Amino acid sequence: MSTAVANEPQGLGLKDAAPVAPPVTVTEKAALEVKRHIADMIERKEIEPGGKLYLRVRVQGGGCSGFQNKLDLDAKFDEKSDHKFEFHGIEVVVDKRSLLYLNGATVDFHDDLNKRGFTISNPQAKSTCGCGSSYSM
C-alpha cells in the first residue's frame, strides 16, 4: 500500500484573492467618539462595566427624500439578521436589509466650529433633501 503526501497545502485558489473591503467604514475619529460615549455611560452607571455595546448603523424609511440613516448604541447582536465589523476597537453591527443601502458608506465624526456630530456619507445616495437629513436612491 502506498501513501501520497502533499508538500504544500492544497487550497481553492483563495489565498491569492484580494481581501474584501467591508461595505461600511467607520473613521478613527468616529470610533474615538463612540468609545467616549460608552465610557460616559459607564461612568454614569447607565451600563455595567464590561457590558457589551455595539454601534448599530441602519437605514429606515422617512424624511423628505425617502431614506434616513440612524446610529445607535445597541446591546443586541443577532447572528441571523446582523453583520458585525470591527473598526478601531469598536464593533459595528448592520442588519442585512440596511447593508443593501449602505454599501460604500462612511461613518465619520466632525468637531468643527460650524459642525459637530456624526455623519454618514453614502455614495449610493442619488439626491438629498434641503436640510441633508434624508436621501433618495
Image: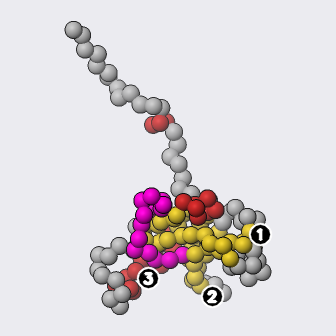
Callout 2, which amino acid? Leu
Residue at 49% from the left image edge and 71% from the top image edge: 56
Q: With 73 as the anchor, is 46 left or right in this view?
A: left
Q: Residue furthest left?
A: 1
Give the number of the disc on residue 127. 1
Q: Secondary structure at mark 3?
A: helix
Viewer-proximal residue, 65 or 115? 65
Viewer-proximal residue, 21 or 61? 61
- Structural distance between the alpha carbons of marks 3 and 1: 31 Å
Q: Is residue 2 above or below residue 74?
A: above
Q: With 51 as the anchor, is 127 left or right in this view?
A: right
Callout 1, which amino acid? Ser
Q: Position of residue 48 (x, y in %)?
A: 30, 81
Q: Secondary structure at mark 1?
A: strand
Q: With 47 as the anchor, is 72 left or right in this view?
A: right
Q: Is residue 72 above or below residue 14?
A: below
What residue would you read off at disc 2?
A: 113
Around disc 3, counting alpha carbons within 10 Å, would you say few (fewer than 14), some (14 to 19), or many (20 or more)?
few
Residue range corresponding to the magenta coloring: 71-86
Answer with mark 3 or mark 1, whichever residue precedes in sequence. Answer: 3
The answer to whether residue 97 is visible is: yes
What residue would you read off at disc 3?
A: 37
Q: Position of residue 97 (x, y in %)?
A: 58, 61
